Amino acid sequence: MILLILTIFLLSGCVRFNPGDYVVPDDGGFIAVIDTLYTPYDIGNYMEENFTYEIHDFTAQTPYELYLSKKGDCDEFSAFGVFAANFHNYITYQIEVFDNTFYQHYVAVYDEDIWLSITDNRYYSFGYDSFEEIVDYVCYIRNKIWTRYIVYDFWNNIIEEVNK
């Protein structure tokens, strides 16, 4: 029974990092970088220029660990983006998207007053009116059909949960 539970846990895909519980490290270089990322657009550009995609199925790096390693996956990019934007007082969310595979996909969402914008992995896009519109777009470009999504606020509280 324990082996079955362990196997299910290991096959569950990305591990969720909670940016609301994150303690900022005492590293002036990291703080200086975060301080320059004023907008979600800046965050997306920084991630695109400095990070590469690497799957981390069973762990989730903190934003600082991602900053140091320069390699991460969707959960880590999403947590970095949400952390950096929240540092500059943006209202932020993370969406966990489920499809018909074992893996989930994570997207950082930023409230930019007139619309919602996202960083999907490292790429910034804008002009969304709802979380479902974001999920539809993300699944369309990934060639997936979503079955469920969960929206979390910065403190990991569930804001919205939708089953298709």
Image (spheres, rainbow, N blue to C red):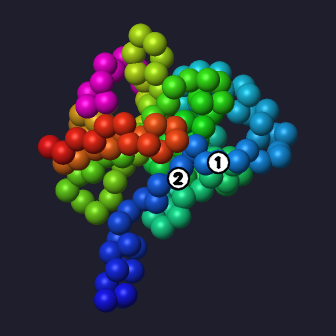
Residue located at (48% from left, 50% from top): 75
Q: Quadrant of the N terminus?
A: bottom left
Q: Is residue 120 magenta?
A: no
The reply to whether callout 2 and callout 1 are in contact (CB within 8 Å) is: yes
Q: Position of residue 112 (x, y in %)?
A: 48, 17
Residue nearer the viewer, 79 or 47? 79
Residue for badge 1: 22
Q: Position of residue 63 (x, y in %)?
A: 63, 47
**Quarter where residue 43 is shown:** top right
* Amino acid found under the numbered disc labelled 1: Tyr
Circle 2 residues within 10 Å: few <14, some 14–19, many ≥20 = some
Q: Quadrant of the C terminus?
A: top left
Marked residue nearer the N-terminal end (2 or 1): 2
Q: Is residue 123 positioned above or below 127 on the image?
A: below
Q: Which mark is residue 53?
A: none
Q: Is residue 79 positioned above or below 88 on the image?
A: below
Q: Secondary structure at mark 1?
A: loop
Residue for badge 2: 17
Q: Is residue 142 visible?
A: no
Q: Is residue 125 magenta?
A: yes
Residue located at (59% from left, 29% from top): 85
**Quarter where residue 49 is shown:** top right
Instruction: Tell me if 9 is positioned left or right of 147 in this view.
Output: right
Chain part drawn in magenta? 124-133
